[in-house]
Amino acid sequence: MIDLYDYRFKHVKITDIDGRVHIGFVEYYTPAINDPDDTENIAIKPPNSEGFVVGFTAAEIAKIEIIEPAENLNIPKLQPAKELQPA
């Protein structure tokens, strides 16, 4: 089984168990303990999507890899969040 925790907030390429390839940014990660079906899952935002995400359980993923954002895919490079300064 794939451990999805390490893919949080990364650009990924997922090959699902049906052989389809999905590319996007991991917007959400849900650990198994917080899922009603006790299943770890993630949701990715595909390039040029209008705010929708595509969800995958760990069992639905045959292969996942971290990729670099590519200009030809219109995947924006995200800047790391700045640390908050005390008031």
Image (tube, rainbow, N blue to C red):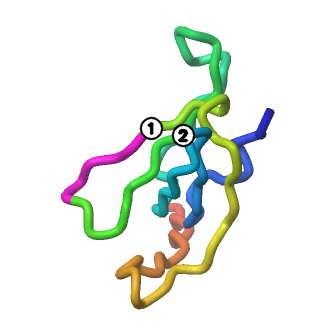
Write down the residue under mark 2.
42
Q: Which disc number belongs to residue 55?
A: 1
Seen at 63% across and 73% down, the residue is 67
Residue 71 horizontal/vertical position (percent): 42, 90
Residue at the extreme top: 36
45 part of magenta stretch? no
- Span of residues in magenta: 50-54
Q: Main secondary structure of the magenta part?
A: loop
| Mark 2 surroundings: few (<14), some (14-19) or many (≥20) residues within 10 A | many
Looking at the rendered structure, the secondary structure element under dot 2 is strand
Seen at 77% across and 39% down, the residue is 2
Residue at the extreme front: 18
Q: Is residue 22 above or below residue 16?
A: below
Residue contact between numbered discs 1 and 2, judged by CB atoms under 8 Å: yes
Seen at 47% across and 43% down, the residue is 43
Residue 15 horizontal/vertical position (percent): 60, 52
| Mark 1 surroundings: few (<14), some (14-19) or many (≥20) residues within 10 A | some
Looking at the rendered structure, the secondary structure element under dot 1 is strand
Q: Quadrant of the N terminus?
A: top right
Residue 62 horizontal/vertical position (percent): 69, 43
Q: Which disc number belongs to residue 33?
A: none
Q: Is residue 85 above or below residue 63?
A: below
Q: Is residue 41 above or below residue 22?
A: above
Please give left or right for residue 55 compared with residue 40 in the image: left
Amino acid type indicated by mark 1: Gly
